[in-house]
Image (cartoon, grey):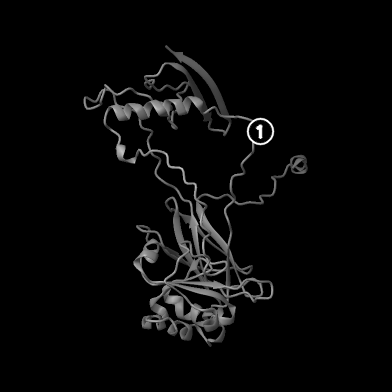
């Protein structure tokens, strides 16, 4: 850095500025080589978020969907095709850098006062008949040993742990393809139509329009196990339909499977919620109920005037004691400041 300063030059920019949210990744062949000119499609799978974008990968196989305006906890499906619409590609999504957490030794937060205040709030709600007492149950001690969960297929992503039918291993080993395997499911003639099923391979759900292209080409010798979920009890968490969990074998000698699709989730922007404080001027406020809030005020957008002064007001809670105030801010040049002080309410 000092070499640039001494030479009177601006430092080289390694990372470009990110003015908005983006989803980036790389398309490679099954052997891991970058794939140039691959067609990439980004499809939103979030309700009330209609979004369909497409792009192509560059000379290094990289692709980017930038300038995205997406809400919090949005989910997407990324699909890719190589030259001549080949599906023998692998999608790699670049993970967003997380915030490192610094571990502090010792006791940094005293929760005793917070727990005591919460207990008092509970008692006030009960006295005002504002708490549904049906959820208040006596403590129950379970002394029986925890039953060992039966695993249908080793390494399965079936979170329910139950299935309406598990395809026997001997059927999988001797079947020529997936269609013949599904025909062996008793009483399930509709299973022969792969396009009508919802397949989940190692925890990744396949888009139904790609069932034939992806599932139909899987070699049964690569399958560890197949679980079929058809009852409402087992499929309710998936939103219905017939669910087929496919667990593929894992190992160094197993070839890389083509994965022309990928499900991802991204944390976008969300509307900032306003901090709640009782409106004591409202005649409908129950003034007989004590204000026992542990956090009484929060305001993230106090702007100072030309003299650097800013003000705001709030009501203290009904509990006397020592209140702790934390003030944090930043000026127009990015300089940060922080001040903590306390005051007593008697």
> Could you tell me how many numbered marks the image carries?
1
| Residue 229 picture quarter | bottom left
Residue in front for this viewpoint, 189 or 104: 189
Image quarter hosting the N terminus: top right
| Residue 132 picture quarter | top left
Q: Can residue 219 be seen by looking at this rendering? A: no
Residue in front for this viewpoint, 134 or 124: 134
Identify the residue at horizontal 29%, vertical 24% (top origin).
289
SS at badge 1: loop
Residue with the most extreme top position: 346
Task: From this view, report whether residue 255 is shown above or below residue 130.
Answer: below
Identify the residue at horizontal 46%, vertical 43% (top origin).
141
- How far across and down, in percent of the image, does residue 244 sit? 45, 73
Identify the residue at horizontal 27%, vertical 28% (top origin).
128
Q: Can residue 275 be seen by looking at this rendering? A: yes
Identify the residue at horizontal 25%, vertical 25% (top origin).
286
Residue with the most extreme front position: 144
Task: From this view, report whether residue 142 is shown above or below residue 344.
Answer: below
- How far across and down, in percent of the image, does residue 46 sit? 40, 59
Residue 336 relative to residue 198: left or right = right
Residue 118 relative to residue 156: left or right = left
Q: Which residue is mark 1?
A: 105
Task: From this view, report whether residue 256 is shown above or below residue 181.
Answer: above
Residue with the most extreme left position: 283
Local crowd at mark 1 within 10 Å, few (<14), some, or many (≥20)?
few
Image quarter hosting the C terminus: top left
- How far across and down, in percent of the image, does residue 297 sit? 41, 27
Residue in front for this viewpoint, 185 or 291: 185
- How far across and down, in percent of the image, does residue 180 sit? 47, 86
């Amino acid at each position: 850095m000092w070499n640039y300063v001494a030479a009177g030059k601006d430092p080289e920019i390694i990372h470009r500025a990110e003015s908005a949210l983006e989803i980036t990744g790389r398309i490679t062949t099954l052997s891991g080589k970058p794939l140039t000119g691959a067609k990439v499609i980004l499809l939103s799978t979030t309700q009330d978020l209609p979004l369909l974008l497409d792009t192509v990968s560059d000379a290094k196989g990289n692709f980017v969907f930038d300038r995205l305006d997406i809400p919090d906890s949005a989910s997407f499906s990324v699909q890719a095709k190589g030259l001549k619409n080949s599906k023998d590609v692998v999608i790699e999504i670049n993970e967003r850098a997380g915030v490192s957490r610094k571990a502090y030794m010792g006791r940094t937060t005293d929760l005793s006062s917070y727990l005591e205040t919460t207990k008092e709030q509970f008692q006030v709600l009960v006295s005002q008949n504002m708490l549904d007492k049906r959820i208040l149950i006596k403590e129950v001690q379970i002394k029986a040993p925890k039953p060992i969960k039966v695993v249908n297929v080793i390494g399965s992503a079936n979170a329910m742990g139950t299935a309406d039918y598990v395809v026997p291993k001997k059927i999988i080993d001797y079947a020529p393809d997936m269609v013949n395997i599904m025909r062996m499911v008793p009483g399930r003639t509709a299973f022969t139509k792969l396009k009508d099923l919802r397949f989940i391979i190692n925890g990744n759900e396949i888009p139904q329009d790609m069932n034939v292209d992806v599932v139909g080409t899987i070699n049964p010798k690569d399958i560890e196990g197949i679980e079929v979920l058809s009852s409402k009890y087992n499929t309710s968490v998936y939103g219905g339909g017939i669910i087929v969990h496919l667990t593929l074998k894992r190992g160094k000698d197993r070839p890389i499977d083509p994965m022309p699709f990928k499900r991802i989730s991204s944390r976008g922007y969300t509307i900032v919620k306003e901090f709640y404080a009782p409106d004591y001027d409202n005649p409908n406020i129950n003034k007989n109920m004590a204000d026992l809030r542990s956090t009484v005020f929060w305001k993230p957008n106090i702007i100072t005037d030309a003299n650097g002064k800013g003000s705001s007001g709030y009501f203290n809670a009904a509990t006397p004691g020592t209140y702790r105030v934390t003030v944090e801010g930043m000026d127009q040049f990015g300089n940060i400041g922080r001040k903590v002080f306390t005051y007593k309410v008697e």
